Amino acid sequence: MGALTRIASLVVLIAAWQFAALEAGSRLLPAPMAVLRFIIQEAERGDLAHNVGITLLRVAISFAVAMVLGILLGVALGRSKAADLTVDTPLLVLLNTPALVITVLAYVWVGLTETAAILAVILNKLPNVAVIVREGARNLDPGLDEMARAYRFDRRTWVLDVLVPQLQPYVVTAARSGLSLAWKIVLVVELLGRPDGVGFAINYYFVQSTDVAAIIGYSLVFMAVMIGIDVLLLQRLEAHVRRWR
Amino acid sequence: MFSSCSGSKPMSAAGAEPVLQVAIAAKVYRSKGAEPVEAVRNLAFGVGSGEIVCLIGPSGAGKTTTLRILLGLDTDFEGRVSGAGQAGMVFQEPRLLPWRSVEHNVRLGLLRARRGRDLDGLFAQLGLTPWRGSYPKALSLGMQRRVALARALADDPRVLVLDEPFVSLDDAAAAELRGLVVDTVESARMSVLMVTHNVAEAIGIADRLLLVSKRPATLMANVTLDRPRGQRDRAWAEATRATLAAQHPGIIAE
């Protein structure tokens, strides 16, 4: 029933798109088949796999680093009042700096390099993860902490059996919202200063020929990849984490 | 009947050196912007080997505070406590880790090096064998309390410390769990310190009652019940309760 509704809504969406394209009859609003043709051509040339692959790699690296650092920072902030007071203001500043500004400054200060690109994405995403995880670390159950002290839990036991399970829902939330954030920022970073990747390709087709079929084609393929990762990986992880409820 | 037994030997059936010693001169809660609250004053008692002692007092009398101090969870007090290092603790709420199985929760009562030990006997004794792989949320409150009890017993403690372990259970479940506790501690010659406000329950199982006043908690009476547990019938329990109520009307209701 759920799957059927999803398919039905997808069919309606594509039909509406087809109808609008026919009505407009313009190169600037290509029909679904035109987009599909572009995807196939680009795939045959090998450009599609190359650009999607390199973007995916950038997303993976920056996502992983931002998650690890963000979790560590979030736990420290949630557990230590002094750390929270010290870092809260810089965190707030970073959280409210536009992604574009962080990206431009990273390229200006570090140079037009891969490192600058990855760094820009990490700096954009890290505060988000830290703030969500901090909330989790603040909400630890005091009764369980008291139990852990009464039973003299060693540090490892406390981390693995008491801390991590209570943080898991927050970490999964941060991961899911963070993944979509990361790939949107990676595209901007690529557009501004990388010679390859989905962001570069979209900019290329825009500047060269305003090829809307190419722009929609690239974004559709990449969106499909990211939704696939969310459904196949993160949603299953979430279900696993919540299995005891 | 009345003694404050600080430093001296407790009136214990076993008569041995106390396993647990508590001597709290004062415990005051100080919070910003509020009057300081004195929770405990001059509370001293011991629990002998193999002895079941019940600490009875009105709600909010500082009984749980006393247990927290005894277990080293609160170190901001004047006085001395000893012996809790060998104690197994059962909290008022079961305080199990909901994301770990019953078996895992019980094994957390052991130090890491000993976590692999054979606990088949303990699970069987407490009737938990079929639930070893379950998550706590799948169990009733009574069964969760049993798991908490199993966790407290896992490391063969010399003393069992119980904070209102039978509240919010129906009569049958409470009686069953009470029976399990008494059987277990009697066969293992374990000492018990139990906090309760249920006088009938205490009269049913205790070797000794410690009556504690309202805040600040202070020891009002130290009552030894020397009739063997097996011979405590309803009439005797009623008479004991009536006598205590007459002597300590502020603590024990008619």
Image (cartoon, coloured by chain):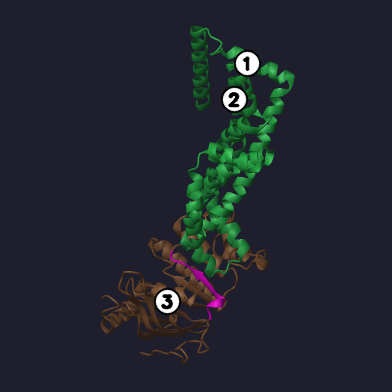
Chain colours: A green, B brown
In the image, residue B236 lies at what x, y percent? 34, 79
Q: Is residue B91 magenta?
A: yes
Secondary structure state at the residue bearing disc 3: helix
Q: Which residues are magenta?
A: B83-92
Secondary structure state at the residue bearing disc 1: helix
Answer few, some or many: residues within 10 Å of disc 1's Cα (few below 14, many 20 plus, some between 14 and 19).
some
Separation of marks 1 and 3 at Cα, in angstroms: 74 Å
Of A95 and B3, the residue lying toward us: A95
In the image, residue B7 lies at what x, y percent? 46, 91
Q: Label 2 lies in what chain?
A: A
Same chain for the residues at labels 1 and 2, yes or no? Answer: yes
Q: Hey, what amino acid is under mark 1?
A: Leu
Q: Hey, what amino acid is under mark 2?
A: Ser
Read off the residue under disc 2.
Answer: A219
Secondary structure state at the residue bearing disc 2: helix
Question: Mark 2 or mark 3, which is nearer to you?
Answer: 2
Going from the N terminus, do you reach mark 1 or mark 2 first? 1
**Residue B50 located left or right of residue B239:** right
